[in-house]
Image: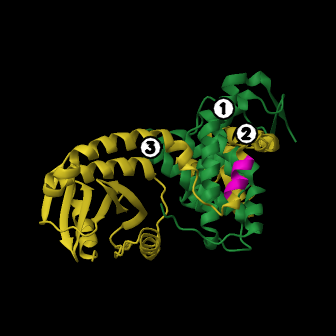
Chain colours: A green, B yellow
Amino acid sequence: MLRRKTPRSDEFSADILALLQPLFATSLRLTRNRADAEDLVQDTVVKALRFEDRFTPGTNLKAWLYTILHNTWRNRRRDSARDTVEVDSAAVEDAASLPGGPVALETPERILLRDTLDADLQTALDELPDAFREAVWLRDVEEFTYAEIAAMLDVPIGTVMSRISRGRRALFERLQATRGPAEVHVARG
Amino acid sequence: MGECRRTVEQLAPYLDGGLSPAERADVERHLGDCPPCRRVAAAASGGRAVLRECSTLLREAPLPPGLRSRCEALARQGGAPLSWRQRWLPALAVAALVIATGLVVLMLESRRSGALLAYQMTMDHVKCDHLFTSADMMPIDARDAEALFSNRFGWKLAVPPSSRTDDITLIAARRCLYTSGTIPHMIYRVGGRDMSLFMLPGVTRARENIVRFGYESRIWSRGGNTYVLVHPLGSDMVAAAQYVMQRTR
């Protein structure tokens, strides 16, 4: 079987391998499954190495890799026909955006969990609709810019911003529902 | 409500400090006047704070054992494909046995019967498409495929190239088992579906179109060789089939 090969450079490979950890963490959060996350990272690495010539040196390699990662994941979901829940529909986004939800908290400027990271946060993240989870992860955990995220997810910046906002809100509400308001410490400052 | 929607849309850049002073003042004025939006903003702010507080830990998901070494091996190969041999060898063995048994039966008859040839090529298309292709195949260059066929197997043929305008992509060029020997086999992806082009060197036969099991087999001869193009039924495949047929020689 013939497949196209592209020139490789050790430096390029090393730069990619140095990003395996964040790639896996993001894959894990996208797929919610370790085996799928491993496959996704491997596929991403393979594609990145094959398409080295399409990467512009000096630009953001991590953002480029994440674009490949998200494209690969999107295609895989489409192919596996698991994408039956259309989280991107206007109806879902509108429903999530309407104010007046069951939030008791009034004006927190900063919120700290009593514990650091625990299963509740991971569960709450995993329960978010895919589109929201991707957006908040890329913004608040990986700290990409709106423009970078828009390019990765292939959606307009306005959509990115609204998904981030709605994802943050939904995450907080889920945490509150899980822990109860008394368990969320609120520090004003 | 229009102002509520505008405010909610601006919440992300507001919390991230990305608004101009004037925009920021607008958002804050509305939040001051609108308790429901204030609650939404509080929740969004809360979610943001939790994520950022825990971002370091979230990023530290331990790598599964072996993933790094597998990726390092891939890097050494320069992005060569994942080892499908390891994954598909058992299936391949079973398929080869089935095919070999079928070949014995079909060997003589298929030389005369277009229907049997169509049947055999359709089975080969389905088998190879299942075993050797995936959703994310990379395009390959027709000239590379021609060089492979010529240099490794001694087959001289023009491989129809991919066509971006017609959404036809050459994704595989391989040697395929056929009756008493092997033949060149090319796989094209057309709008997400695959079609196979086989060449039977040194054989000529009458032109025929035969439908078997939801696949159409187009058989024709040119330059002393016979070609068989197998594709799923559908109007979108017809133009692609014409494209490929015109480019064989």
State left or right for residue B96 relative to residue B5.
Answer: left
Give the residue type that dot 2 points to.
Pro
Callout 1 secondary element: helix
Would you say the residues marked 3 and 1 are in contact, meaning their CB atoms lie under 8 Å apart?
no
Left or right: residue A22 compared with residue B109:
right
Residue at the (76%, 40%) spot, across then down? B61
Q: Using the image, name the chain to which the residue with label 1 belongs.
A: A
Numbered range of the magenta stretch: B68-74
Residue count near mark 1 (Cα–Cα under 10 Å), binned few <14, some 14–19, many ≥20 = some
**Label 2, label 1: how far apart the Cα atoms are:** 23 Å
Between disc 2 and disc 1, the foreground one is 2
Residue at the spot of label 1: A124
Residues at marks 2 and 3 on the same chain: yes
Residue B8 shows in this picture:
no
Characterize the local packing of mark 3: few (<14), some (14-19) or many (20 or more) Cα atoms within 10 angstroms: some
**Residue corresponding to mark 3:** B92
A107 left or right of B224? Answer: right
> Residue furthest toward the right?
A189
What chain letter is assigned to the residue under label 2?
B
